[in-house]
Image (cartoon, helix red, strand yellow):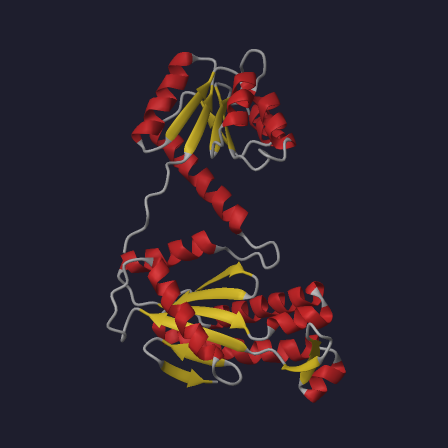
Amino acid sequence: MTEPAERPDLILVVDDDQDIARFVQVNLKIHGFDVLVAGDGQEALDLVEHHRPDLAVVDLMMPRMDGLELTRRLRANPMTSALPVIMLTAKGMTVDKVVGLTAGADDYLVKPFDTLELIARVRSTLRRNQEFREVSPLTGLPGNTRVRREILDRMRGGTDYAVGYVDIDRFKSVNDVYGFERGDEFITALARSMHRAVVAAGLPPAFLGHIGGDDFVIVCHPDQILPLTQQAVVDFEQAADELYDPEHAARGYIEVPDRRGNLLKAQLVTLSIGVAQSIATGRKYADPREVIAVASEMKKVAKNQPGSYIAVDRRKAESV
């Protein structure tokens, strides 16, 4: 299974110098980007209104509307406020760079510039922007795209790895009884527990991602996965006990009303963790999504077991 073909990133080039605009356009296309060209800021705004560029390379000095004013207007519009901008200018003075960055530019490139540097800055700015948009505002951890790339990097590196899919059991009952704000405290508690376990795992470095809600992903060496997850389970359960109201923690359950108003008992939260590995499974993964799918399948196996549980690929499971 291979990654599906994705559309090329669309780059908007804004420069009143047609030769420079054409030069940038040709080189971006050579490196696989789609390109739109505008001669000034006003034309650029018109193009942005009808297209959705992924990044803009903007000249500082232009007629009608210069690069600073264009960048300010992009930042002021909620639909374009997150569009990354690389400022392109012949000026090299520090004050000009400061003005451009203050206006909202993400990076700065001085003419004349090296083509490879331009391409590198475009790619790095796109990557940073993608990762920033996916970072969880609650936990500060990277999201889906970064998780898939981490797994893919380990696949390509040829080293053994394990992927753990972590989920809080009966998390909905917490939200139903205490509200979403208290629910967020449980999620951040899990993030802290997972982070402490990742740090304690030592080298090689383990990776921790938050793919949404109460779902987390760990990528590490197979020898690290059980010690890491076992420590996280113990740490989280202790932290979670302190987040419950004292009487609920003492009796070991909370009462959740159903649709008819009847009170149902819900045990305190635990963790279900599914693990996929690159070794001892007989599988040859070709795509990060395959690994995540197997880890998700094993997480479902773990959820059928009492208490916190770690289910490992090939139905090998180990209770905590």
- Asked if one can make out residue 3 in the rendered structure from this viewpoint, the answer is yes
Residue sitting at 62 percent across and 29 percent down?
103
- Left or right of 120? Residue 233 is right
Give the quadrant of the N terminus: bottom left
Report which quarter residue 121 is drawn in.
Answer: top left
Please name whichever residue, 93 or 261, is drawn nearer the observer in this view of the structure: 261
Please name whichever residue, 148 or 196, is drawn nearer the observer in this view of the structure: 148
Report which quarter residue 270 is drawn in.
Answer: bottom right
Return the x and y of residue 56 as percentages of the image width and height.
49, 29
- Left or right of 271? Residue 254 is right
Residue sitting at 35 percent across and 64 percent down?
291
Residue sitting at 51 percent across and 85 percent down?
306
Is the residue 76 above or below the residue 288 in the image?
Answer: above
Please name whichever residue, 294 or 154, is drawn nearer the observer in this view of the structure: 294
Return the x and y of residue 149 as percentages of the image width and height.
38, 54
Residue sitting at 53 percent across and 67 percent down?
195
Return the x and y of residue 300 as percentages of the image width and height.
45, 74
Is the residue 111 above or below the residue 5 in the image?
Answer: above
